[in-house]
Image (cartoon, rainbow, N blue to C red):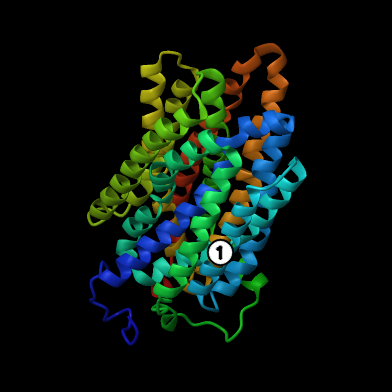
Amino acid sequence: MPGETAGTRTRSDWTLATSYSLGFLTLVSAFNYLDRSLLGLALPAIKAEMHVSDTALGFVSGFAFLLFYSLLAIPIGWVADRSNRRNIVAFGFAFWSLMTLLTGWVANIWQLALARFLMGAGESCGLPPSSSMISDLFRKERRPLALSVFGTANSIALIAFYPVLGWIGQRYGWQAMFQAAGAAGLVFAVVFLATVREPARTSRAREAKPEFESLLAGLGQLLRLRSYLALVATAMLMGLNVFAASIWIPTFLQRVHGLSLAEVASTIGPIRGVFGIAGVLLGGFAIDRLIRRNGRWRITIPAIACLLLGPVEVVFLLADPSWLWLAAYAASAFLTLVHQGPVFALVLEVVPARLRALAVATLLLCSALLGQAVGPLLVGMANDALAPALGPQAIRYSLLIIAVTAMLAGVAILLAGRWIEDDLEPAIRP
């Protein structure tokens, strides 16, 4: 807390104030995930209404959203390392919620693309400053668990919001889903600004740094860290996996297994949410306990989760019996986000404290442009290419790309583990 030095700090991390801040940041992140992925739930209805190809839908779902999201993430991260992070998060939350609200009134694919562009600009204000805030709320030893809690945001969105919005979409149309989500986000943005405080930056005093460090100089220092580059590769590969799945799996379930929009939202969404939370939290708790004996567990657990995820997703995509693909879907939900908290904790550990938000923003840029933007588009293009021969079944083979990227991500985490000790400088890594 203010006035304490890193060397003398003996406070408990999990106080009412830190827990409230972490909880609200997690809620903001849940809306971040919800608003960007809600389009996946609406794609079949939008395709029927606007008469566009899967390639066009993949472009709007991925590239249109992520262009501004990724390009603005780095300058916003640089600003967040030097200014009030709480205000940046609140402004971004309000702006992307407004764009979500306006999505409910688009009339054609071009208006939808514009709304996605602007939504991405707002959402770029979310993760980098939030991660930096959490790094100052919790000590290094507690960050994997805190960031794992933060990582439950995706699952919270699926459990708490997807069923309600799916019911709204089934009853009142896909536009009403966006209107309801955007209006709720605007209200929470005001509450966040009024009740969450900017945490003190507790670790900067230990770093020797110039009075002013340019953006390019900061990026140059990050790119010299091999372990950081391996973690960026992990984020790119898993970004492709997670985002392509979130956009296209609802369509896969409707085309291949005949589920309705409401069934996807009320059944499949909560299954992924419940098992996703279980995987994120159990992974975080396991690392929190095991690293006290051996620090290598912070590498081993997320690597194993990614390596197992690939075969599980193959079973989910290719199985026909409902009990088998449902079981594989639950298992994939359990494994998918185990890596998230540990990867962000490793990034915050290996980079200098003054570059934390910039490091997260750079990771997001690479993940967005080379992972998330490409994933939905590749699947959409593969759908259109395979559809003449395979019809509705084409999507189950197009989605096999997510299994490959998951296993490659596991390899990247193991490489980061080989290099991280050489890159660490204990004197300046809180």
Count of labels shown?
1
Q: Nearer the viewer, residue 188 or 394?
A: 188
Relative placement, left or right, of 264 versus 286 is right
Residue 64 screen position, x and y as percent: 70, 47
Q: Is residue 126 above or below residue 63?
A: below
Pointer 1: residues within 10 angstroms few (<14), some, or many (20+)? many
For the C terminus, give its image quadrant.
bottom left
Whether residue 74 can be seen here: yes
Q: Quadrant of residue 323?
A: top left
Q: Residue at x 42, y 27 (%)?
A: 312
Relative placement, left or right, of 322 versus 217 is left
Q: Residue furthest front?
A: 172
Q: Is residue 375 above or below residue 186?
A: above
Q: Nearer the viewer, residue 241 or 62?
A: 62
Whether residue 139 can be seen here: no
Residue 404 screen position, x and y as percent: 54, 31
Disc 1 marks a residue whose amino acid type is Ala
Reading the image, the residue beneath label 1 is 94
For the N terminus, give its image quadrant.
bottom left
Residue 410 screen position, x and y as percent: 46, 40
Q: Residue at x 67, y 48 (%)?
A: 105
Residue 313 screen position, x and y as percent: 46, 27
Q: Residue at x 55, y 78 (%)?
A: 82
Helix, strand or loop under label 1: helix
Q: Nearer the viewer, residue 352 or 1?
A: 1
Q: Is residue 145 above or below residue 242?
A: below
